[in-house]
Image (cartoon, grey):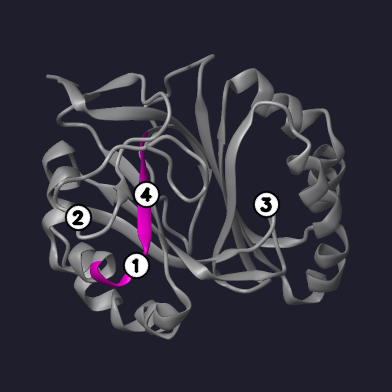
Amino acid sequence: MIDTYGYPKVLDYTCKNECCIELIRPIHAMNVTKEIVSITFFQYSKRNRWWAFNQMQLALSPLKKAKGKKFFKLMGTGGGFGFSLKPDLSTYALLMVWEDLEAAKSFSLSESYLRFNQQCVSNFTYWMRCIQSHGTWYGTKPFTPTNETTNGPIMVITRARVKFNKVFRFLNYVPKTSIAIEKAKGLIYTKGIGEWPIIEQATFSYWNSREQMENYAYNSDHREVVKKVKDEGWYKEELFARFIPINLNETHE
């Protein structure tokens, strides 16, 4: 079965609506005691978009109480590729870091998840394990990297808080980076995410291989922007993390 974004999916029997719990080649078995990261994209109809927007505040308290949760962020999304100035008011992202496999699996039965699922048209979740992470998110290091290496499929989260006096400089380069990632070879999926428009920007991307991801990062127009970020000090805070896709149904001790 194919979801609304054109990606293969399976159905979670606990869902009222269709939702993608495992996406595209989750090739790594999961150690039951290791930290797990998930990012879920909820898509809403026009009728429920105001409800979804209000959850940016109303859902925070229930999410804080989620069993086994180490870190979470509920975010809006962008309508284009990568960093996008145009919001996608139909889609919201929920990033969660779980203590272990049991906590991750139990979330689909939680009050928070079921509330989102009752209101959305569809949702899908990427499950992953962090293998590399640099930087902070509001002073916190949200991920515990395993320092593994991989040449296969890889996921990336980048996040930055832009300095107010660098906002216009940053905005001038958004179109160039969006075009670069749209043309990137090996890109499976990408979505701009963030807590606040413009000043707090993040992206999630999924690649066929580490090599193709690094070719984009280091050998395209994106490299020029990264250099300017460093040389001119655009960011107040930044984070870069790599992940490998995992299969929650294949575990080992």
Q: Is residue 205 magenta?
A: no
Q: Is residue 178 left or right of residue 202?
A: right
Q: Position of residue 251 (x, y in %)?
A: 17, 22
Query: Which residue lies at the image location 69% right of the left edge and 52% below the top edge?
Result: 81
Q: Is residue 217 left or right of residue 35?
A: right
| Residue under pointer 1 | 120
C-alpha span from label 1 to label 3:
23 Å
C-alpha span from label 1 to label 4:
11 Å
Q: Position of residue 12 (x, y in %)?
A: 21, 45
Q: Is residue 195 left or right of residue 103?
A: right
Amino acid type, label 1: Cys
Q: Which mark is residue 15?
A: 2
Amino acid type, label 4: Phe
| Residue under pointer 4 | 124
Earlier along the polypeptide chain: callout 3 or callout 4?
3
Badge 3: how crowded within 10 Å, few (<14), some, or many (20+)? Answer: many
Q: Is residue 232 visible?
A: no
Earlier along the polypeptide chain: callout 3 or callout 2?
2
Magenta: predominant secondary structure element?
Answer: strand
In the picture shown, does residue 245 fall above or below 102? Answer: above
Q: Position of residue 224 (x, y in %)?
A: 87, 42
Q: Are marks 1 and 4 in contact (CB under 8 Å)?
A: no
Segment tinted magenta in the rendering: 118-128
